[in-house]
Amino acid sequence: MRTHSIFGYELLIKQWTPDGWRLPKSFVDIDLNVNAKLLVETTKILGKKVQYCSVNVSREQLMDTQMAKAIIKSQVQLYPTKLVVELTEEQGPHQYCDSKLVPYLRKFMEHGMQISLDDVGTGDNSFESIHSFLPLASELKFAL
């Protein structure tokens, strides 16, 4: 059934440049406090306007307590809309083993979120490296 309305949003931070709004060279370089604040402010505005809202999160961001709290707060603000946490391939300055990431992903799921593995086949998201995340994922996005 066509409703001629927007079904969902994907939140992706951009920065102002002399050429207009552009993706940053590295999402990891964006201050996590800024990222967390923008996520909470944006999801508060979106409210219950769509059926789902997704946000890209790097391993580095996932392990940051403030960002994790912002993600949970965003789901609370969006409820009953689902927040989809898309784990990206972007590498940060620290390397985190899967066993450290899984509890964070499970906590998000306990708050009603879904987990998506973004850009599988590139960067840190090689198919071999995501095995421990597969039971948690509701979606895999392959880079072609």
Image: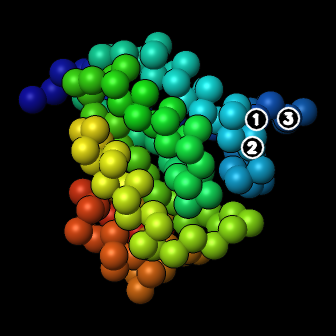
Quarter location, residue 82: top left
Q: Which mark is residue 30?
A: 2
Q: Are marks 3 and 1 in contact (CB under 8 Å)?
A: yes
For the residues labelled 2 and 1, say whether their Cβ atoms are less than 8 Å apart. Answer: yes
- Circle 3 is placed at which residue position? 17
- Vertical side of 138 occupied by 40: above or below: above
- The coloring applied to the image is rainbow
Label 1 crowd (10 A; few <14 / some 14-19 / many >=20): few
Can you tell which of label 3 and label 2 is closer to the viewer?
A: 2
Residue in view at x 45 percent, y 23 percent: 43
Q: Is residue 21 left or right of residue 2?
A: right
**Foreground pick, 138 / 34:** 34
Instruction: Indicate left or right for 29 with 137 as reference.
Output: right
What residue sits 38% from the left and 64% below the top?
Answer: 102
Q: Amino acid at mark 1?
A: Gln
Dot 2 falls on a residue whose secondary structure is: loop
Q: Which residue is mark 1?
A: 15
Place of residue 63 in the rendered image (x, y in percent of width and height, measured from the top left): 55, 55
Image spot of residue 137 (x, y percent): 28, 61
Q: Amino acid at mark 3?
A: Thr
Q: Point out the tag, 3 or 2, that comes first from the N-terminus.
A: 3
Residue 64 point in image, percent of width and height: 59, 49
Q: Are marks 3 and 2 in contact (CB under 8 Å)?
A: no
As measured in the structure, the alpha-carbon distance from the residue carrying label 3 to the one carrying label 2 is 14 Å
Q: How many marks?
A: 3
Q: Is residue 113 left or right of residue 18?
A: left
Kindly report the distance in space between the C-alpha atoms of the residues bearing marks 2 and 1.
10 Å
Q: With respect to residue 55, does 60 lie above or below?
A: below
